[in-house]
Amino acid sequence: MKPAPFAYHRAHSVAEAVALLAELGEEAKILAGGLSLVPMMNFRLARPTALVDVSRIDGLSYLRADAADAAGLRIGALTTHRTVETSRDPAVLNGFGVLPRSARWIGHYPIRSRGTFGGSIAHADPASEWCLLAVLLAARIMLTGPDGQRTVPAADFFEGYYSTAAAPDEMITEIWFPEPAERAALTEFAPRQGDFAVVAAAVSVDVADGVCRSGRVVLGGVGPLPVEVNADPLSGQPATAATWQAMGEHAAGQIDPPDDAHGDAGFRRRLTATLVSRALAEASQPGDEVQA
Amino acid sequence: MTGWIGAALPRKEDRRMLLGRGRFVGDLTRPGLLHAAFVRSPHAHALVNKIDGTAASQAPGVERLFTAESLGCPYLLAMLERDEFVPTAMPILAGEKVRFVGEPVAVVIADDAYRAEDAAELVEVDWDPQPAVASMETATAAGAPRLHDHGNCLVDLLMFDDDRLPEIFAGAAVTVSATFSSARVAALPLEGRACLAEWDDRDDQLVMHVSTQVPHQVRSGVAQALGLPERSIRVIAPDVGGGFGLKCVVGREEVAVAAAALRLRRPVRWTEDRQENLTAAFHGHEQRYRVKAAFSQDGRILGLDAEIDCDTGAYSVFPFTCAVEPLMAATELPGVYKVPAYRARGRAIATNKAPAAPYRGVSRPQIVLVMERLMEKAAAALEIGPLQVRRANLIGKHEFPYTGVNKITYDEGSYRESLDLAEQIVTEKAWAADRDRLRSAGLRAGIGYACFSERTAYGTPTMSQRRMRMTPGYDTALVRMDPTGEVIVTTGTCGHGQGHETTFAQIVADRLGVHPGQVRLRQGDTDLASYGWGTWGSRSVVIGGGAAGRAADVVAGQLRKIAASQLEASPADIELAEGVARVRGDDHASIPIPELARLVHFQAHRLAEDLRYGLEARATFDPPGTFSNACHVAMVVVDPGTCAIRLRRYLVVEDCGVVINPMVVDGQVRGGVTQGAAAALLERVRFDPEGQPVSATLMDYLAPTAAEMCAVDIVHLQTPSQFSETGAKGMGEGGTIGAPAAVLGAINDALSDTDVRFDHIPVLPQDLSAALNQAGAVP
Amino acid sequence: MKDMHAISLKVNGREHELVVEARRTLADMLRHDLGYTGTHLGCEHGICGACTVVLDGAPVRACLVFGVQADGAEVRTVEGLADGEQLSDLQQAFSDHHALQCGFCTPGFLMLAEAYLAEDATQLTEARARELVAANLCRCTGYQGIIEAVLATARARRPGRKPADEP
């Protein structure tokens, strides 16, 4: 299981990476953590003619509050999952605590130490945690290409299984979460701890005085993209287990999930109902505020 | 004789492994080393019209390409001397036909492993795909495509019959009928197969370093396939990274690499990759049992009838043949229970899948699952407690040696005692209260038991009942003391993680009165060891260790006589202990053992003639076999919302006779339980209807991690074996044998308030979800 | 033509300079070009963790990293754990707790534990230790000995604890 030959290029800056991608053509791929790409190369299912290694570019690993609008969070594309997981920064924990809490679902410790936020978004596995949370929290993906920078809303960025709106000569540089979500949660079911999710549910709720004013539910593993289901059954309902369960059943009824080795559609519906309900219960609990 | 026996001595093997200085086949270096990559069939069943290696042969770095034709169409042929057996020669490289996805048709030899793979992709093969047979049902249907010239049933053995059975069934209080099945699984050693072959001009020998459990059988297989005398082949198993039965058969790739090295007169190495290991190596345990059992009102079995089918894949493995699983199953199904009337038919069915090899436990995980499920079903039908039904049937201590209806004689074990003790511990540790608490919290939880015996250390007479042309069993050890009193032991066994370097040293050191640190075991080299049978079937400590003990006794006898002559005492009064030979009861009359060794080697003239020369001896051990036993208890929790099934508690009460090293025994139990539990919860090798492997990577084939396991508590009973030189019994497979039944039992107990029951493994969350939906049961 | 790159790196503190083909994995480079055969290959798709080494302080699966990517980096492998012939506390704990049988997966577990304990030895509970150990595959041991060895090492390394001679 040795990969096919390719030309290796190390980029020292985003500009250089983009220039290399343009020069090398569509068969060139970005190499960041390599955890999704290299196994495919070792199986010879992926045969890029060239790799542009961006993993040593400085200045792309960060978690920082918006300068202009202090409510948002900007994540550099090369930030590792582990960095997110272990962040104690109030800018992250206050309002975006769902991110570090969800990081623990990603693989195992060595995977999280090497895999990157941008890499996950670029890989676009519809059941992956960052893709779901990007859609849930209306994140914006910042791309740099030969013609400059552009921003794509997460909901428009994912186009299908492992397929995104990024052009072959563009590089993700930042993922921007403009709006915090005080009460958000993600939970999933996987065959073993650390495996890819069969179904994942990412939710956020707006709860005040024991009433759920509104909420959002995004599902992974039920189709080629993260799927936002209609969350009307949450509006104006008491913030109780009965409401969460009803929403879970409602979500299960809205999806048309695939059959595969990990389960048939009926199983995925059961998982959806359970996971949505549990995620809502978790999200509705107030998080711990961290003082700066 | 209890100096070192029973000591939890730290393992001698550990040091080099911890330092990263293990020597595995992939670690070896050779000047001019060439690398082999195989061209493998993408079709499950196809004729091979033409192989065009032109482009591949001209690719950068390629030394040569070999096909069946260019090697002279060598093959391995495993034979069973039975009319009901259909032999299937396994070509080293398939020539005219391929019979499973991954079957090799050519091998490319290149100067680097990457380039070898590049070149292998350039080989063009003109395939003529045929309809594939991907299941036993398809294989045995009328008009089924044939893999070989004969039909797809490769062995059909009515091993036992009893014409009283129809009447027994007619008159029984309860008859239980059921079909049980288990999925195909992969042995999955962390090190795949590997072989480095080179010609040695000086010794006029092909030297093969192989990651194998059976070095002598590799030698015999290569000799047979390539038409060489055995003395011109030397097989060395260096450090081997696990085997579990995958490596106790000879691989065709090993022979191909040997042939290439012979032709090229250059060293050639192949290291299997994981994709090959999961698809094109060997599998096991895909079996189906259609069983009927008659029970009396008080729960005793009156009769048992079993039709056993084993999916054996495309060929018989060498040397065990495709009969290994059905023979084991049909012969040993009654297990620890007294079955008065028995019929069993075992079949091996060929399918377009990789061949089945004797994976850990062979058919015993399956037969234990069957018997334990029968006990549970009978208990439900009779409204008796399931443990009570078991007790009504277990062979009791006063009944040993017990000769069963299957003509096996069971030596003394603790079948009832281990169940009693397990139940006692489960009660003391309040398992039932834990389960009930979980149930009231809205979860499902269940407890399952499995009682079983494990036949181990089969000697030649026992193995001969199978009628293999190459009948295994015995093993021979050489024990040799050097002039400084240190000892080398060689045996024909071939450890790959079982701690033989430590346990055999304990046995020998005990007999010789030295420290195990002074005893070095050399295994795995066919030039050093007398012909032996390797390590599998839980045989090594009993047979290899037993032979070593006997050889050590001979050397000890010589030491005693020399000491006696020096100390003017009688040999019977001399004891060897703590590094000295001394007169029993007299601390002043002693000689250090190294001094005795020095005398023998360097002052031979001072000794009486019959005491001279070489402190060394060779001894063979060939026992009938001996049964260890255990009782496993498992608790599982089911999350009703997701149907996730998790292990919560696990207890093993096991009896392997005299324990040489309890730490090593516990490690074997825990590793085996992990494999067995995973067989019940996670693992399955899958094919689509066209015979295409679906579980070709570790992302699809789910091996257990630490997170899927809970702590395994182990309690030892010790019923010494009268058939074992040391009183020890084998036990390496027990964990794998009992765990599937215990876990399945726990799952079924967790569903006890529904009509849903499972009689197959694995039980996956999606299976549970579908079954509960169908039954309209509340999850 | 192979895409070759001249690189230099440190392995266990020792400088190396060599020329490698772009696609040569870090695992193969360490094993075959530099002679550090302690790192083993169990799957070559990043699941089993037998090839785990520490690259610039972080645990990585060497089968998923190309050798050329380690240019200018510091790599630690199993060969660098011992102090000469003296086993480290972690290595000794593996032996004490029977955390290995065939030994093939062992270097990967050692480096996994080493990397984690370097980050955070103090907070390791049994549950966390089991979760950590779940990152790699072992087929022989059933994991219990590995978990115990890692826990014992973590406990002994806690600040305020005496060094190895404490029982």
Image (spheres, coloured by chain):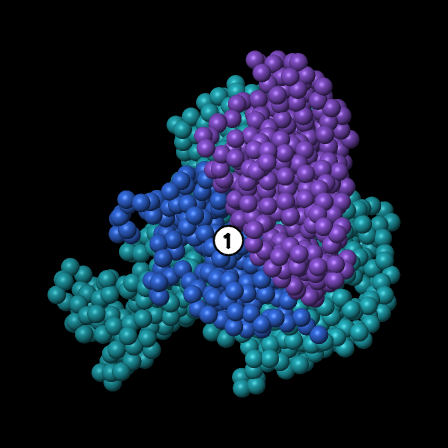
The quarter in which the N terminus of chain B is drawn is: bottom left
Q: Residue at x 22, y 83 (%)?
A: B606
Residue placed most toward the observer, A74 or C48: A74
Q: Which quadrant holds residue A164?
A: top right
A162 or B23: nearer the viewer? A162
The answer to which of C163 and B90 lies nearer the viewer is C163
Q: Residue at x 24, y 70 (%)?
A: B593
Q: Position of residue C135 (x, y in %)?
A: 53, 47
Residue B217 showing in the rendered view: no
In the picture, measured across the screen, residue B54 lies left or right of residue A250, that is: right
Which residue: 39% across, 45% down?
Answer: C121
Residue B404: give x, y in percent of width and height: 54, 43
Residue B601 visible in this rendered orientation of the protein: yes
Numbered circles on residues, count: 1
Q: Residues within 10 Å of mark 1 (few under 14, many from 20)?
A: many
Q: Is residue B531 left or right of residue C156?
A: right
Q: Position of residue C20 (x, y in %)?
A: 60, 71
Q: Nearer the viewer, residue B445 or A112?
A: A112
Look at label 1 and name its amino acid.
Answer: Pro
In the image: residue B596, left or right of residue B671: left
Q: Position of residue B494 (x, y in %)?
A: 49, 63
Q: Colour of chain A?
A: purple
User: In the image, is residue B206 above or below residue A139?
Assistant: below
Quadrant housing residue C127: top left
Secondary structure, mark 1, is: strand
Q: Chain of mark 1?
A: C
Give the residue at the far front of this rendering.
A68
Who's blue, chain-wise?
Answer: C
Residue at the spot of label 1:
C59
Say which colour chain B has: cyan
